[in-house]
Amino acid sequence: MAKPKRHLLATAEETSNPPVSLKEGEAIARVVRGEGKNLYVVEQPDNKKLLVELPSRFRSTIWMKRGGFVLVDTTAFEDRENKLDGEIVNIVRDDKQWRKQAYWPSEFVKQSTYPDDSDEEESTVGKMPPAEGSDVDE
């Protein structure tokens, strides 16, 4: 049976706003890839890769994509002896609000969706063709 809509809405509301400050052991990380069985490889700002688990409250409720950001608690599995390095505490959905926070890592700068083509000559897309009578090279 599917989860009631109130659980879905409560989880969505919980992830929509960033926390005021991060707790000890929490860090922002970028999702690199999914490993299966609700396990994800994430990359911290210092390029250290971690294997983290997605808690059951986020499963089939909020979707993550590669390159997205999550809030990871690295102290969640310290007492257990296993391969997991942490647990996903929150999923960054509106990174515009999150980027305004003081704890957002400077290594995760927003990248343009279109790469710079500055080394190639200037594009003529959307420009008017030169007039027939005018000679630009003179």
Image (cartoon, rainbow, N blue to C red):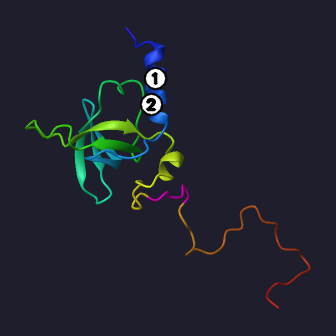
Distance of label 1 from label 2 (alpha carbons): 6 Å
Q: Main secondary structure of the magenta part?
A: loop
**Height in image: 42 above or below 128?**
above
**Height in image: 123 above or below 51?**
below
Q: Quadrant of the C terminus?
A: bottom right
Residue tagged by mark 1?
Answer: 10
Task: Classify mark 1: residues with Cα within 10 Å, few (<14), some (14-19) or many (20+).
Answer: few
Is 51 left, or right, of 9 in this rendering? left
Magenta region: 109-114
Question: Front-most of 136 and 1?
Answer: 1
Q: Quadrant of the N terminus?
A: top left
Is 31 left, or right, of 134 in this rendering? left
Task: Classify mark 2: residues with Cα within 10 Å, few (<14), some (14-19) or many (20+).
Answer: few
Is 80 left, or right, of 116 in this rendering? left
Q: Secondary structure at mark 2?
A: helix
Is 48 left, or right, of 101 in this rendering? left
Question: Front-most of 87 and 35?
Answer: 87
Instruction: Find the residue positioned furthest to the bottom.
Output: 138
Q: Residue 137's spot in the image, x, y percent?
A: 79, 88
Residue type at the position of mark 2: Glu
Residue 95 painted magenta = no
Residue type at the position of mark 1: Ala
Instruction: Find the residue positioned furthest to the right.
Output: 133
Residue tagged by mark 2?
Answer: 14
The residue sitting at 43% across, 18% down in the picture is: 7
Residue 136, by quadrant, is bottom right
